[in-house]
Amino acid sequence: MWLSLLFILILSGILTFIILRQTVSQMTAAPLWILWAILMTPPLVTGVTVTWSKQIPPLPIAIAVCSICWLLYWRLLGWRRSTPRSLDAIPPADLTQSLPEILPRSEPEPGLILSEPIVEVAARPIEAEEEAILRTCFPWNVFFLEKIEYRPQAVLCRGKLRTDANNAYTTIVENVERLFGDRFFILFQYSLSTGKPFFALVPRPQQTAITRSRRWLDYAVVGMLFLITLVPTTYFGAALARLPQGDISDILTAGLPYALSIIFILGLRDFGRYFVAKFYKIDTTLPYFIPLPFFPGTYGCLVQIQSPIPDRQAVFDLGFVASTLGLVVSIPLLVWGLAQSETVPLDIKSTLFSFHAFDPRFSLLMTLLCKLALGSQFVAQRAIDLDNVAIAAYISLLIITLNLMPLRRLDGGYIVHAMFGQKSSAIISQVSKLALAFLGFIRYRASDFSNPDLLFLAIAIALIPAIDEPALNDVSEINSWRDALGVVILAILVSILIPVPTVLMQFLNV
């Protein structure tokens, strides 16, 4: 057994290093081997525990190790890169280091070879005589230009917006490209200090031609990671079916329903984000499945966006489509799996991960779905012994819920940023952290201080930065029907997080 485990660890280590090198090697000053060591810590801990004690690490230890490693990874990923609150709020000396958060990096897409990447950074983005030409790009009835400020790697154009934001951005971009070609990225943002919109012109990095000769390697890695992900998810599916041992056919029969369900739900979610990015011509990596040697066996896929997002409409669609695909698939599968499940006596110490004595009353939506699927079988003082498909759909729903939190780089962060703008979304993010901590404390107290699962999750989420990167055109607002869809999906998030009111519990007899 330990030889098989060693082989899996070595193969996972090699693939993890390849993925890191292709996706994040140019995004951070942190050494690549440190990032690799952090990501490999959970499987190494699991491997050592299984080898010595012949048991999988307890779930609380696994969650703690994963959370610590995850937070360290994201902190190091931002090493020597300051969070871009706004270009005008960044001191000139720090602007060069902050721009990679917003602008595309000089490396090509994963799997593409850049023969000689060259990035030219001028001390002054435009010459003195070009300033007069630049001023002609800003018609007075579109954007009344008041002053031009220079940064080492950007030109900030301040003034008054005189027309619709979309029209202004389109007009200015067309004028600048007509006179300066593709020399600049044009950013349109709100100043966090004054609240007024301004334009920023940033020189594009110069690159040589790229070749696609190694694109096959990306698809090979995706396929290998998918097959590797099948191994732990199938094993945990069999373990959840109380079949930790047996011949291979029994393990596959018991474990594949869970494995295929969770991979399909989470994979569909991230492939949706990938295709939305391609629709908006945003450079992104392929969706890489993430195998985990501990429960639940996978966290889904990793999709790394590598170029700026054009506008808030694209920001919204990136978050909304991914989350919606996950919800549209996970909720019906959860209802079907619940219908195959049975009720058992309620255990007062039931947690979020007590799958064979599951108490859904911590969540309004979960309670309603359980009542819908089980009807009169689900009553007061009864819990649920979840079917494997129900467990997969429930775990997927938890992961989707986590990603719907309005925080940086999460689906909910994209949605809230697109709906309310960068500054307001940062405030909403901070409020949501406090609200989740409050709900976690209520759940902890209601369990006689024996169940801190939601409180622990709230503490981990509190460490995620609130402010997200702006889009190129971060001023133009999204349309009204996207606002309505955003309200609906945020309402679903609230219905998952809040407990069932006592009045409703009495009415439903649960």
Image (cartoon, grey):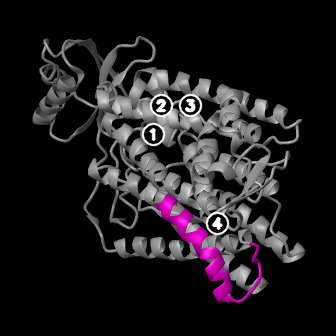
Q: Earlier in the sequence, mark 2 or mark 3?
A: 2
Residue tagged by mark 2? 84
Q: Type of residue at label 3?
A: Ala
Specify few, some or many for label 3: CA neighbours under 10 Å numbering under 14, 14-19, or 20 or more.
many
Magenta span has 417? no
Circle 4 SS class: helix
Q: Is the C-beta separation of discs 3 and 1 under 8 Å?
A: no
Q: CA distance from mark 3 to mark 1?
A: 15 Å
Amino acid on which the number 4 mark rests in the picture: Asn
In the rendered structure, which disc, 1 or 2, sits on the residue that comes first in sequence? Answer: 2
Q: What residue is drawn where x is 49% and y is 64%?
A: 264
Q: Residue furthest front?
A: 376
Q: Nearer the viewer, mark 3 or mark 1?
A: 3
In this view, 480 is above or below 404 = above
N-terminal label among 4 and 3: 4
- Vertical comparison of 343 with 293: above or below: above
> What residue is shown with label 3?
466
Magenta-tinted stretch: 242-267
- Labelled pair 1, 2 in contact (Cβ < 8 Å): yes
Task: Point out the frontmost of discs 4 and 1.
Answer: 4
Q: Does dot 3 land on a helix, a strand or a loop?
A: loop
> On the picture, is 124 further left or further right than 453?
left
Mark-to-mark CA distance, 1 and 2: 7 Å
Q: Residue at x 73, y 79 (%)?
A: 5
Residue 388: mark in rendering: 4
Picture coordinates of residue 252, whole percent (x, y): 62, 81
Residue 255 is inside the magenta segment: yes
Camera-side residue of 466 and 22: 466
